[in-house]
Image: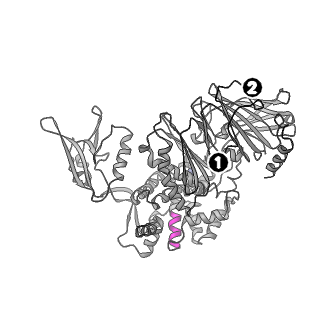
Amino acid sequence: MLQKSKYLLLTGLLFSFIITKAYDGKYIYTIDLTHVVNDKVYIELEVPTLEGKDVTFYLPKMIPGTYAIEDYGRFVSDLKAVDKKGRTLKVEKTGANSWKIMKANKLVKITYWIDDSYDGDIDGPDIFQPAGTNIEAGKNFILNASGYFGYFEDKSNYLYEVKVIKPAGFYGSTGLIPQVSNKDISAGDSLADRQFEPGTKVDVFATNNYDELVDSPIMYCVPDTTLIDVSGTQVLVSVYSPNDLITSKQIANTIDEVLMAQKDYLGGKLPVDKYAFLFYFTDEPVMSYGALEHSYSSFYYMPEYSIDDMQQQLRDFAAHEFFHIVTPLSIHSEEIVPFNFTNPKMSRHLWLYEGMTEYFAGNAQVKARLITIDQYINMLREKMMVASEFNDTLPMTTLSLGVLDTYADQYYNVYQKGALIGLALDLTLLDLSDGKYGVQNMMADLSKEYGKHKSFKDNELFDKIVDLTYPEIKEFFNRYVDGNEPLPMAEIFEKAGLIYEKEGLFYDYSIGLTNDNIGVDMDRNVLYIKNEDKLDNFGKLLGLHDGDVITAINGEPFPELGPQVQSYIINIMSSMQEGKEFTMKILRPQEDGSEKEMTLRTKTVKVARQAPYTIRPMEQPSPHQILVRNAWLGLNKLLKRVIR
Ligand SMILES: [Zn+2]
């Protein structure tokens, strides 16, 4: 605040003089996206006023939300420091992300080239793509500020202005509101002496500090954007799909429902006035993909498939990233805000930031009936299955503190066990409160206590939650989050009148085909029944036999073998309903060597099979257990809606 008002005063007084003068308390960056040379772009920084003999310039070692080291300084080359007369000052590289510049009081300008992280071959840690950078001349630029712009020691709280020189027809999608859009380049601008193609324009963005700049990715490309209004919040969906396989309109249609569910979950109002979903789809083979949250946007790096193949995954991702608005963006410890970009410190509460967020993403969808209770239970079972691959006696708090090094290989468990901690805490609170107070209430209370600009002390959070809730919760944290005891899943599910077994009978829909009974005919590119002895009850009901080639299910032609088979089966399974007719078209081998086309039919029923981590309702739950279950799954609310 102080910096800003000082700056405003200064510009007011010196209005016409400041073009060539170094600014006090303000970084002015210019980046040219129209001249890509060897996959690099050029950046010029007009520096704030500096004092002293020398100064160190940094790019971040790490940014919030990734829980991994990035070392963005690697992508800088040919860094030059220049004084007022254009003479270069001595620069010494002092670390992976730092440069010491001599005669700092003479420094007016720093220039350098930046390579990108998406297709570069620079040594160092792999950067999670949503936190990375892309330079694809004429096609797409991902500006995560951490990969382009830096700060001087102790001066990341200065104002930032970023001028982006962009190719004709390009649009910068972001959660930031631009200061100026589509300005022509004028004589006073930095880099104005370069040759530009007709139609080249400049956008100008400004933030109060470096944290806000890093919190605001910008995607430049020929726009495919859709703007929707979600009960008063302006939501931008921006898509880069290199082969036009998926559009912003399709995604906006599918996440609209999710955001409505999140609005209800958060008490009837989304906590921001505007928000941007930025999607970069790649047609390159991907080893990993994902998304990263910000205060007014989230960025998604995903393989390029059609909306039908991506639907549920997009919804799960969008729900998770948007819920980060609650934590860590508004409930966070001092390790997170203000963030130390040079020497990051870890908080012990990843169970909260990632685990609770992931729990919310699933629980909000089942409460709004965007997914069925069966789908939700399977989501939780999958988390238990994946969590079983990790160290279950490592306290989540210890994992969090060591996530950058010692326990980096356990990080993925924060999305599994972390979410299950959210579930366990929710059911424990609902049990203690007769269904009146769960984690939704707890997070709302923590939001009131803290906020975007008020951090909690890392080692005081558990006590604060105990103060807000019940003394029994202290023991819960001591044993299962801060201690090394595995979560007591049977005890937890019992609170909602459910029977949990580590290995048990599981009742679910089946299409009769499992890995045990099918074969693949590579020559014909078809699936057939190979082992009819291994058919489950549904396969037997249908009357499948060895040699039957599957050609269609419920009238939907069976796809060519490939990744699309999985989404085909998911779609079939999610449309199954007790008692509904189920058909399977097959080709059955005949004695004379020919094949006969047949349609097998049966009524849809759930079948029992032996499976890990099974959850089923008790025969006679108590009224209290039903109360807890209904509150957990939002069944009371549904009942009211049906009655109305
Ligand atoms: Zn997350």
Q: Residues within 10 Å of mark 2 (few under 14, many from 20)?
A: few
To which residue does mark 2 refer? 193
Classify residue 480 by image quadrant: bottom right
Instruction: Using the rendered image of the protein, determine whether residue 184 is visible from the camera's viewpoint.
Output: yes
Q: What amino acid is labelled 2 in the image?
A: Asp
Q: Secondary structure at mark 2?
A: loop
Residue furthest to the bottom in view is: 623
Q: Residues within 10 Å of mark 1 (few under 14, many from 20)?
A: many
Residue furthest to the left in view is: 592
Q: What amino acid is labelled 1 in the image?
A: Pro
Give whichever of 587, 381 is nearer the camera.
Answer: 587
Name the quadrant of the C terminus.
Answer: bottom left
> Percent position (x, y) of residue 537?
25, 55
Which residue sits at x=53%, y=64%?
Answer: 425
- Tell whether 162 sits left or right of 137: right
Which residue sits at x=32%, y=54%?
Answer: 576
> Percent position (x, y) of residue 101?
81, 34
Going from N to C along the chain, the mark reached first, 2 or 1, is 1
The scheme the figure's colours follow is one colour
Does the beta carbon of the residue at mark 1 sit less than 8 Å from ligand 1?
Answer: no
Q: Secondary structure at mark 1?
A: loop
Q: Main secondary structure of the magenta part?
A: helix
To which residue does mark 1 refer? 64
Which residue sits at x=63%, y=24%?
Answer: 38
- Tell whether 446 sits left or right of 525: right
> Percent position (x, y) of residue 557?
29, 42
Span shown in magenta: 424-435
